[in-house]
Image (spheres, rainbow, N blue to C red):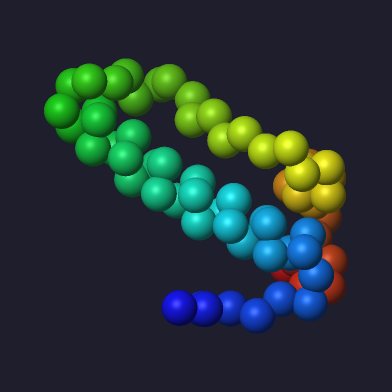
Amino acid sequence: MQSIITLSLTIAEYCVYDTALKEAMWIKKLLVELDLMKNNEPIKLLTDSTNAITTIKREKYTGPTK
């Protein structure tokens, strides 16, 4: 099922990473509740997409990335 339509691969990858991070945060919360992980441990999200990394590191979002 397709939930969004994007005009560029960069935006599509950014949306995927956003969803993955939300799921990782939920899993971390569960692991903290089960006392299997400390709350102060960071969540690592890895990618090899240069465009997605550049988009995420921007301090100001414009156009379709708002």
Taking 63 as reference, is 22 left or right? left
Quarter of the figure with residue 35 = top left
Residue 12 in the image, given as x and y percentages of width and height: 69, 64
- Quarter the C terminus occupies: bottom right
- Quarter the N terminus occupies: bottom left
Q: Residue furthest front?
A: 1
Residue 43 in the image, given as x and y percentages of width and height: 49, 30
Quarter of the figure with residue 41 = top left
45 is higher (above) or lower (below) than 9: above
- Residue for point 57% across, 35% down: 45
Taking 51 as reference, is 12 left or right? left
Tally the numbered discs: 0
Q: Is residue 58 visible?
A: no
Residue 33 in the image, given as x and y percentages of width and height: 18, 32
Q: Nearer the viewer, residue 9 or 26?
A: 9
Q: Nearer the viewer, residue 33 or 18?
A: 18
38 is higher (above) or lower (below) than 44: above
Q: Is residue 4 visible?
A: yes
Quarter of the figure with residue 39 = top left
Residue 55 in the image, given as x and y percentages of width and height: 80, 51
Taking 34 as reference, is 29 left or right? right
55 is higher (above) or lower (below) than 44: below
- Residue for point 41% across, 42% down: 24
- Residue for point 50% across, 56% down: 19
- Residue for point 62% across, 61% down: 15
